[in-house]
Image (cartoon, grey):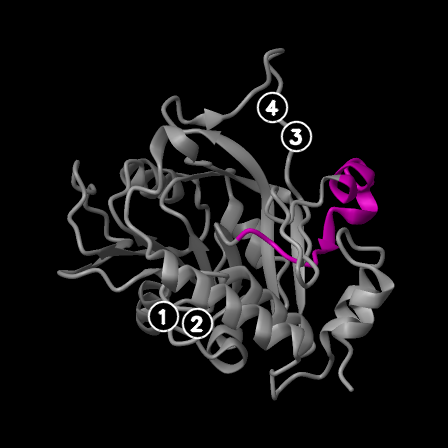
Amino acid sequence: MKNSELVSVIIPSRNELFLDKTVEDILNKAKGNIEVIVVLDGYWPSPPLKKDSRLKLIHLPHPKGMRNAINMAVAMARGKYIMKSDAHCMFNEGFDIDLSSNCDEDWVVIPRRLRLDAENWRVQKTDKGKPKPPIDYEFITAPGHHDPRGGRWDQRTVERMNNPKYQIDEDMNFQGSCWFTTKKHFDNTLKGLDEKGYGTFIRESYEIGLKTWLTGGKVMVNKNTWYAHLHKGSKYGRMYFLNLKEIRRGIAFCEDFWFNNRLKEAKHDLAWLVEKFWPVPTWTEGLLESVRKK
């Protein structure tokens, strides 16, 4: 049965090896009304994408970056719901129905994240042939801390793995490779992605997640569906250049903005969120106190 509400899938893309497979997978796996908007950020894909009435392309002759691509695509999106996906992801059958059926107006919803074996287009497996464990939860790292796993909260994932109570559950943070929300929330609360402070790429999930949590919304993980994401690593590399100075400026802006509670529309301070998920890896009582709004 098809969902009457349109889902607009946004895919920012630059020099991607698996864009065609990602688009084809999304179009094949969706069971409701869907449109896919691909932003070709300064390139044309090879092989070219197959024509489909549900597919729209935005081609930029010169690259402008991921945040610009997302903002541009959302502006032309017609759906009640927006889903952003990286250009190297595989999805569960009916992902769009599962996500749109469990998304309040002020929620950002993350499908369960698995790992993608892109060349064989399947979920990565262990040496014993079983799918590798999912990544369900992430956390905001404390001031002055760097987590080499990118904020992956493995302990919380394991503790809540098989409990049906947590099939749709609150999540402190997420990776950014896939997220789902209402267009109204993106336009009215997120107000688009900030291209000035963060630059073209950095800390997408921090901006989206913290704006949502601190203005009274929620970030939720939905384990009833999943997507598999390719970790490019040294084998594939990023496939395009990112300016190191811009990255450092974006991280510095992000940390100053959130650790100093600079969001004017906030109903809560950052300490409220940390306390909500307490105890949180890398955080101490002293660091918690340091982000409390005075």
Q: Residue 64 occupies which quadrant of the picture?
A: bottom left
Q: CA distance from mark 4 to mark 1?
A: 34 Å
Question: Which disc is residue 133 wearing?
Answer: 3
Where does the magenta region start and end? 155-175
| Residue 48 visible within the image | yes
The relative height of residue 1 versus residue 60 in the rendered view (above or below) is: above
Whether the residues at callouts 4 and 3 have beta carbons within 8 Å, the answer is: yes
Q: Earlier in the sequence, mark 4 or mark 1?
A: 1
Specify the amino acid type for callout 4: Pro
Q: Residue 143 occupies which quadrant of the picture?
A: bottom right
- Name the spot of residue 46 as percent of width and height, x first: 16, 38
Q: Earlier in the sequence, mark 3 or mark 2?
A: 3
Q: CA distance from mark 1 to mark 2?
A: 6 Å
The relative height of residue 169 versus residue 189 in the rendered view (above or below) is: above
Q: Quick one: which residue is furthest to the top in this view?
A: 128
> Is residue 166 found inside the magenta-colored segment of the image?
yes
Specify the amino acid type for callout 2: Leu
Specify the amino acid type for callout 1: Asn
Q: Which residue is mark 4?
A: 131
Question: For mark 3, does the 10 Å Cα neighbourhood hold few (<14), some (14 to 19), or many (20 or more) residues?
Answer: some
Q: CA distance from mark 3 to mark 1?
A: 33 Å
Q: Earlier in the sequence, mark 2 or mark 4?
A: 4
Q: CA distance from mark 2 to mark 4?
A: 34 Å
Q: Earlier in the sequence, mark 3 or mark 1?
A: 1
- Name the spot of residue 89 as percent of width and height, x first: 43, 40
Question: For mark 4, does the 10 Å Cα neighbourhood hold few (<14), some (14 to 19), or many (20 or more) residues?
Answer: some
Q: CA distance from mark 3 to mark 2?
A: 31 Å
Whether the residues at callouts 1 and 2 have beta carbons within 8 Å, the answer is: yes
Q: Which residue is mark 1?
A: 71
